[in-house]
Amino acid sequence: MIELIPAIDIIDGKCVRLAKGDYNSMTVYADDPVGMAKSFEDIGFKRLHLVDLDGAKSGHTANTKVLEGIAKSTNLEIDFGGGIRTDGDVQKAFDSGARIVTIGSVSVSSPEKCLGWIEKYGADKIIIGADVRNGTVSVNGWQEDSSKQLLPFLDFYIRNGAKNVLCTEISKDGMMGGPALALYRQLMAAFPCIHLIASGGVSRLEDIQALEANGIPGVVFGKALYEGKLNLKELWAWQNA
């Protein structure tokens, strides 16, 4: 069964969502990310995708205090990303309560550093963040497009021991128009052994069911939860059927 992972994106200590990664399109949903995380745990979720958008944009982590607060107040398995650039950033994330760390920009700019973290912490503790726009991987909070084509980029990491991939189709993110199924099918066909987490576009239970039917191991969603588009009773009834 597909793993259900709610997301909290943080700017200035608040829970927000962007549209297509555009910082000028920010919507604030809550002032208390710890309270939001607790509400997700109360609903029945076991895991949380926590994104430091301030860190992603600035190039250094800025919201590890939020991470620490959520980790101390819940039993959620937190994967944390955004602004992680150094050995110290990775260690601080783990020390602050992250169970898993998502590496985005550094996986593009410094692959040897990213591979070193996989070796040091283990492949189960590192997610390769592949945020895609027009077929290439984007970096620095989606503000820049790299020259890295998605499939060769992922092939390099998988051949070198990576197991976890979080792939966001940026044009879908925050738009609630349905996930990029064709892209995820392509990735699973190319790399059938990876733990792929789909992100972007989920608006209803049928979107999650479609990902499950296509063999996608995990899905991240946020806006559909915040805006009440997901029927949670139907979601849990389907998952526990």
Image (cartoon, grey):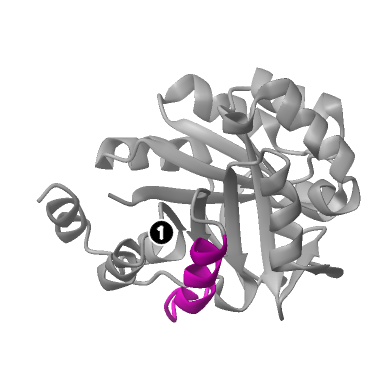
Residue name at image x 51 percent, y 25 percent = 71
In the rendered structure, the answer to whether residue 104 lies left or right of residue 237 reads right
User: Total label count?
Assistant: 1
Left or right, 70 with reference to 128 = left
The disc labelled 1 sits on which kind of residue?
Ile
Please check the rendered image and state whether residue 178 is part of the magenta-colored stretch, yes or no.
yes
Name the residue at 40% across, 52% down.
Answer: 217
Above or below — where is 177 with respect to 74?
Answer: below
Depth check: 189 or 165 in front?
A: 189
Is 38 placed left or right of 63 in the picture? left
Which class describes the residues within 10 Å of circle 1: few (<14), some (14-19), or many (20+)? many
Q: Can I make out residue 200 in this image?
A: no
Q: Which residues are magenta?
A: 174-190
Q: Is residue 116 above or below residue 213?
A: above
Taking the spot 56% from the left edge, 37% from the top edge, the residue there is: 79
Q: Position of residue 159 (x, y in %)?
A: 70, 46
Percent coordinates x, y for residue 19 in the rendering: 60, 73
* Residue 8 appears left or right of 146: left
| Residue 47 seen in the figure | yes
Q: Provide the residue designation for mark 1.
A: 216
Q: Position of residue 1 (x, y in %)?
A: 27, 49
Name the residue nearer the viewer: 95 or 37: 95
Q: Quadrant of residue 28?
A: bottom right
Q: Is residue 89 above or below residue 170?
A: above
For residue 233: magenta?
no
Q: Residue at x 57, y 31 (%)?
A: 124
Q: Is residue 23 above or below residue 65?
A: below
Q: Secondary structure at mark 1?
A: loop
Viewer-proximal residue among 197 and 10? 197
